[in-house]
């Protein structure tokens, strides 16, 4: 895969309630990767409408995710921040991928099963083919690395399968057009750190999610210090003190989760956190976690609120990002059309 330029792509859905899981599992990694790679970070509004959205809320949520990217420290002059619907090549390539991807592959996607639930017949076709669009998001930029939380691993694997099948199905025209052995790279998921799967504060067996009906299940990036403190104090735990090593967290999902969050926020490891809190009870640990979370999250929430007061500024950043993204996407789509056999 060394023939491909290294490039990072990732996306976040503008569906409201951006939370600590999104921040620790994805957005903080986005920030770190800026120093090493050329990055594109996308607000995936086409994905958001796979379930019903109110137009005004959608617009506001697109700006909220953009504000979170900026507040967390992504630099839109060095990298590209944009919303998906402003680059039509995503949807165009997704159609080609609808014809490459297989029904059997999509039938295995656990996120569709979870989201569609029991009322599967009534789910949108978009929700079903969602992973094909996600593959198009990544591959329209020939991105090689994709930072995501654990829950997106299966989708990235599908993107690799689609890239591989496209390369194989069209091997002859790819070779004839001078693209070498493979046209698309096989993108690698980057799932790293102690908080790749942050769990609900109410139930350690469920992941923290934007759609959980209980607001107490998650810490939103725009929560005030008081709300953060209340939510952490109410978070479910067990009766034991904290153990001395991570082996002692086995079977204690809630404790494990809070230790992971502490480690991620303080940029250390769970082992180090347990060295410090070995034997402590939860009231002590939670107080320290409240201070740390408020310290790290409140400034981001405040900056997001400030940025959202100037929607025109946010929209201008998205427009500029989309123009720059399109320069890459147009080129790749042109080659795809040539490979597939379309006249242009
Ligand atoms: P989304 O919007 O659900 O989540 C955005 C990012 O946050 C991560 N994440 C979590 N990480 C740790 N703990 C959690 N509880 C948690 N919840 C969410 C997600 O893994 C994700 O990285 N399908 C994607 C968006 C997408 C995309 C893409 C991502 C569309 N196209 C192309 C990468 C590349 C999604 O729904 O993420």
Image (tube, grey):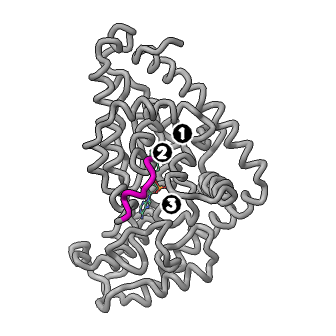
Residue 96 percent location from the top left of the image = 42, 29
Q: Where on the picture, by quarter, is residue 120?
A: bottom left
Q: Can you say whether 14 is above or below 95 in the image?
A: below
SS class, disc 2: strand
Q: In which quarter of the image is the N terminus?
A: top left
Q: Earlier in the sequence, mark 3 or mark 2?
A: 2
Residue 329 percent location from the top left of the image = 54, 28
* Residue occupying image coordinates x 55% and y 83%: 229
Q: Which residue is most to the front?
A: 121
Residue 141 percent location from the top left of the image = 48, 31
> Which stretch is magenta?
119-125
Residue 285 percent location from the top left of the image = 42, 84
Residue 23 - label: 3
Residue 214 - label: none
Residue 10 - label: 2
Task: Tell me how many marks there are.
Answer: 3
* Tag 2 and tag 1, C-beta contact below 8 Å: yes
Q: Can you say whether 41 is above or below 336 in the image?
A: below
SS class, disc 1: strand
Q: Earlier in the sequence, mark 2 or mark 1?
A: 2
Q: Ligand 1 quadrant?
A: bottom left
Cβ of disc 2 within 8 Å of ligand 1? yes
Q: Which of marks 1 and 3 is nearer the N terminus?
A: 3
The one nearer the camera, 150 or 15, is: 15
* Tag 1 and tag 3, C-beta contact below 8 Å: no
Q: Can you say whether 131 is above or below 195 in the image?
A: above
State the CA–CA distance, disc 2 to disc 1: 7 Å
SS class, disc 3: helix
Q: In which quarter of the image is the C terminus?
A: top right
Disc 1 designates what residue? 40
């Amino acid at each position: 895969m060394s023939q491909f330029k290294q490039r990072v792509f990732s996306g976040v859905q503008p569906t409201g309630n951006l939370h600590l899981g999104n921040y620790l599992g994805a957005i903080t990694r986005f920030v770190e990767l800026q120093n090493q790679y050329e990055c594109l970070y996308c607000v995936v509004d086409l994905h958001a409408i796979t379930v019903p959205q109110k137009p005004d809320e959608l617009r506001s949520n697109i700006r909220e995710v953009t504000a979170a990217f900026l507040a967390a420290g992504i630099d839109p002059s060095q990298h590209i921040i944009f919303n998906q619907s402003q680059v039509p090549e995503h949807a165009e390539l997704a159609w080609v991928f609808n014809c490459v991807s297989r029904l059997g592959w999509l039938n295995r996607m656990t996120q569709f099963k979870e989201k569609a639930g029991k009322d599967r017949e009534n789910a949108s076709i978009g929700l079903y083919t969602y992973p094909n669009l996600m593959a198009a998001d990544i591959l329209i930029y020939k991105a090689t690395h994709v930072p995501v939380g654990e829950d997106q691993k299966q989708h990235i694997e599908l993107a690799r399968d689609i890239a591989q099948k496209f390369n194989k199905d069209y091997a002859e025209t790819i070779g004839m057009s001078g693209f070498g052995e493979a046209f698309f790279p096989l993108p690698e998921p980057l799932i790293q750190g102690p908080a790749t799967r942050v769990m609900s504060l109410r139930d350690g067996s469920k992941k923290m999610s934007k759609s959980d009906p209980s607001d107490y299940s998650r810490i939103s990036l725009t929560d005030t210090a008081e709300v953060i403190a209340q939510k952490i104090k109410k978070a479910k735990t067990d009766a034991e003190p904290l153990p001395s090593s991570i082996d002692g967290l086995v079977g204690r999902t809630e404790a494990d989760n809070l230790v992971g969050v502490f480690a991620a926020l303080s940029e250390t490891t769970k082992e180090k956190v347990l060295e410090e809190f070995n034997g402590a009870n939860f009231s002590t640990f939670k107080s320290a976690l409240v201070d740390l979370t408020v310290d790290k999250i409140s400034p981001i929430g405040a900056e997001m609120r400030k940025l959202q007061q100037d929607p025109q500024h946010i929209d201008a950043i998205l427009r500029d990002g989309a123009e720059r993204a399109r320069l890459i996407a147009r080129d790749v789509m042109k080659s795809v059309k040539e490979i597939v056999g379309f006249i242009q």
